[in-house]
Image (tube, coloured by chain):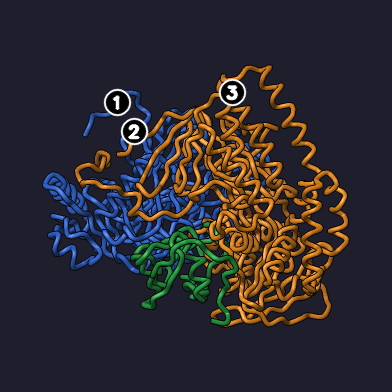
Chain colours: A green, B orange, C blue
Amino acid sequence: MVSAFTRIVASHHALVHINVDGVDCVAPAGEPLATSLLAAGYVMLRHSPNRHNPRGAFCLMGVCQECAIHVDGQIVQACMTPVRAGMVVQLRGAV
Amino acid sequence: MVSPHCHFDVLVLGGGPAGMVSAITASQNGLRVGLIDEQVEAGGQIWRAPWASSPQGYESPEARDGNKMRDRLALSSVTCLFGRRIWSVTDRYRVDLLGADGVEIFQAPHLIVALGAHERVIPFPGWTLPGVMGLAAATIMLKAHGLAPPKDWVLAGVGPLLAAVAAGYARKGHPPKAIIDLSGPSDWFAALPSLASRPGLFKQGVGWVLSIVSSRIPIYFRHAIRRAEGQDRISACVIGPVDADGKSIDGPEVGIACNAMMVGNGLVPGGEVPRLLGADQVYRHELGGWIPECDPFGRTSLEHLYAIGDGAGIRGGAVACSAGKLAGLAAAHDAGCIDAGAFAHQSAQALAEHRKLSAFSDAMAHMIRLRPAQVASIEADTVICRCEDVTRQDLVAAARAGARDVNQLKHFTRCGMGPCQGRMCGDVAAEILAQEHRLDRQAVGYWTARPPLRPISLQSMLGRFDYADIPIPKPAPL
Amino acid sequence: MSTMHDLIVIGGGINGATTALFAARGGMDVAVIDRGPLCREASGVNAGTLTMQMTRVALIPYALRAHHMWATAREWLGHDVGVVVCDGLSLAFTEQEAELLAFRAGKRREAGAPITLITGQQALQIEPGLSDKALLAGHCRVDGYANAYLTGLAFRTALLDAGVTLTENNPATDIRQTSSGFEVVTKKGPLRAKRVVIAGGVWIEEMMGWLGIDLPIKTLVNQLAVTERIPTAMRTVVGIANGLLSLKQYPHGTVVIGGGWQGSGSREGGTCSLLPERLVGNIRLACHAVPALKDARLARAWTGFEAETRDALPAVGPVPGIHNAYVIGSIHSGYTSGPYLAKLLADQILGREPDLPLFPIDRLLKPEPLAQG
C-alpha cells in the first residue's frame, strides 16, 4: 500500500496472524497493535461518538484514547495492546 | 476482595528516568521499593526501550542511557511491577492496579510520583483526521518500533523534538517533505548559549542540523498549520506565517499535499495523581502548566508524597534524573533510613547538578512553552475536545453564559468529559476560557482529577464474585 | 451601603436556586450567593435520578408533584436540564430482597406512588438489558432522570432572567440580625435583606450556627461513576430493593452508576475521596443487574456530599424564633422532590398558603433522640 507507514528496522520478532475486520494480516508478536495497524495501512481506526468524524491513532502513548477499538470483543487502546496470534480486531470504537 | 500488599516502604509510579533513578536511589539507601509502570519495560518515553531493533542494532544516545539505567535497575533490589495500569491512588498511599492477573493493591507509607507529561497539540481544523499524529508519537515510532510515516509527510510544531524527529527520519532515508517550525532562527540562536553547559547535547544538536541540511528538507520558520484537509485521512495541509508570539498573521499560505503529519507544541505535566490526593497546585507557565508545589527534593504539600520528573514541571530527562536522586534520598531520609548528615552530604552533589542542568532545561522549556497568542488564533469551528467534539465556539459560548472555571466549563459543554479525561484538551480549553474572561490561568483552575486514572473496562474491575459476596450496604431509610 | 434586598438566599443549589427563582417571580428583589458556581456541589454532581422507588414514603406526594416539575422544566425553568421520563425498575435478586421490595413498594404505593410488582420475566420485557436473575421487580412509570451537570447553566440563566442578583464564588461567613432584617457577611462584602434563606446543603449546620440554632446535619459522601459512551444497553432507570443502586443510560450513551455507596471525607475539609473497594462493589452490583455494562469502560468516578437530618426527612421551613429566616435542605434522596419543596417554601415566603405542609425543623432541635423506625 503506497500510503502505509513503512518499517525501517528489520524486526527480530516472530510474525503472527491477526484478523482485522475480517482480513487476515501479519504482525510481529508483541508489537503494540496500533503500530502494526499503521504498518498494515489501517490509518483510520474509528469514528468519534458525537459527530462521527474519522479518527486514527494519535499519541501512541496511552493518553489520547483515539485508538480505542474492539479487540476480541473488548474495547482496548491499540497503542497499549501487544499483538497476539489470532487476535480479532474490529475497527470501531466504543459506540 | 483482593487484599493489599504492604511490604514496600515506598512505591514509585512511573518507570521513566525520574522514577527509575528515584527507585534505585531509595533502594540503595535501605528502602524496600516497588516501581510501577504500565509499559512492560522501564524507560518512560525518552528512554523507551527499542522494541523492534535487535540488541546489536543502531543505538541513539537516549537508548544507550536507557539501557544503562535498565541494567542498573536490574541489578538493584527494586521490585519491578510492570505491565500494570494504575487506576486509583488514595490516602496513605494505596495504589490500585490492573494487570494481566487482574486487580492488585499495593500500599506503602511513601509515594514517589513520576508519571511524566503528555503532549500539547494546538488544535487546527482537521487535526482530528487520521494520519495527523503527535510529535511524541513520531519519536516512539522512530525509537521503539522502527516505523516511518509514508513518503509524503510533514513535520510541524515547536522545540528540539522537531529537529530530533526530522534528523532521525532523514538518517533513515525518510525525511519529512517539509518542516513547519513555529519558532524562527532567532529563537534557536537564543537557546544556544544554554547548550554550552551540555556538550553532549550540543554535539547531538549539531548532528541533527547537519542531517536536516544535507537532506535539503524545506523549513518554514515562523509558520504554523492553518488546516489539514482530507476525507477519511489527511491528504493535504495549508500552512501560514505566525509572529514571534505564535499568532497567525497575514502572509502567503502554502498548500502541501501529504498523507501524514506529525505535530507537537510542547508538553503538559501529567499531574493527576498529586491532584487526586489533594496536594497544593500552582500554575507555572514556563514549566508547562499546573504542577504540584514542591521543595527541591520533590516533597509536595502532603506528607511523604513526592512528585518529580516532567509531571512536576517540564524540565527534561537530565533534570529528571537528578530530581529522581534527590527524591530517592529524601524518601530514605524521611523514612529514617539515612540521617541528616548523610542526607545533606549525598544530596549536595545532586542539588549542584540539578542547578547546573537547569540553564539548558529552562531554555528548552521556554521554547516549547504555550503561546497564548497561538491559542487566540484558533478558529471558531475548530474541535478542541477530541473525545466529545467540542469546538472553540462551544467553549466561548459557555464562557459567555457564565462559566468562569474549567470545571464549570466542563459541565456546560462536556469538554474534557470523554475517555482521555481532558488530557488532550485541558490546557487549551483553560487558556481559551482565561482569555475570554481576561483572567490569568491560576484563576480558571484545572480539571478536578478523578479515578480511574485511565479508563478501564468494568469487566476487568469485577474479578470473580457471587452476588452474595457483594457487600451491599444496609437499606436506605423507608 | 448595599441595597436592601427583600430576600437573600445563601446557597445556589437546586433548593436555593428554585426558592430564589419563584420568590423573584413572585415580585421580590432577590439575591443569591454561593461559595462556588451554582449547582456545583450535590446538585450538580449527583446521579440525577428522579424516582419514587428511592423516595421516602413521607415525601411521595411531594416527589410526584416535583417529578412533574422536572418533566416540564423547559416551561418553568426555561432551559433544558436533560430530563428523560422513563420507566423505573427496582429489582430483587434474593428471597429476602423480594420481601423487602414487596413491603417497601406497598408502603410507597399507599402513599400514592404508582408502583406495581412484576416478575423478573416481566421486568425483562420492559428492560431487555436486564439480567435474568431478578426474582421480582417494582415497576413505576413515574421515573426518569435529569442531567445534573446541566442544572448550573439552566438555573444561572433562569435566575438572571428573573432579575435575581447573583454572586457566585462568594462564600458567606456570618449572618447578623439587624433592626430591619439581616446582614450576610460575605467575602465580597456585606449584603442586606429583609429575609434570609439558608440553603447551604451539608454546610447548613454551620450556617444555622450563625443564627444561634443547633441543627445537626450528617454528611454522606456518595460515590458515583460513569462509563464512556456505549451503544444502547438500557432504556429505564434500574435500582435494587434496598435502594443501593441507581443505573441509567443518558441519551448521549454514557451510563451513570450510583446508589449511595459511601466514600470518605468531610465537609469541613471540603475534600472527599473514593474508596476503591466500594467502587468495585457498586460496579459488581451494576453489572449483575445489567450484564452488558461489563464491556463498557469506566471513564470517571467521583464523590458528592449529601446532607441528612437526624430523621432523614427534609429541613424546610421557618427558623424557629427568628422572624423572616428560613431554611431548606437535607432532602434525603431529595433530588426528585427538591424543586417542589423549594416552590412551597417560596410560597410561604411570599405569604401564600403552601399546597402541602413544609417540614419545619422544630422536631430536629429537641435534644432527645427520636424513637427508631
Q: Which mark is residue C369?
A: 1
| Amino acid type, mark 3 | Asp
Mark nearer the viewer, 2 or 3: 3
Subunit ID for the residue under disc 1: C
Q: Residue at x 57, y 20 (%)?
A: B337
Give the secondary structure at mark 1: loop
Residue in the foreground of this view, choosing between B336 and B440: B336
Asked if residue C233 is positioned above or below residue B339 in the image, the reply reads below
Q: Which mark is residue B334?
A: 3
Check whether the beta carbons of the residues at disc 1 and disc 2 lie within 8 A of each other: yes
Q: Residue furthest front?
A: B56
| Amino acid type, mark 2 | Arg
Q: Residue at x 68, y 48 (%)?
A: B443
Residue located beneath label 2 in the image: C310
Subunit ID for the residue under disc 2: C
Q: Residues at marks 1 and 2, common chain?
A: yes
Q: CA distance from mark 1 to mark 2?
A: 8 Å
**What is the total number of numbered labels drawn onto the structure image?**
3
Residue in the foreground of this view, choosing between B111 and B84: B84
Asked if residue C98 is positioned above or below residue B231 in the image, the reply reads above
The answer to whether any part of residue C323 appears in the image is no
Image coordinates for residue B153, horizontal then vertical, percent: 66, 75
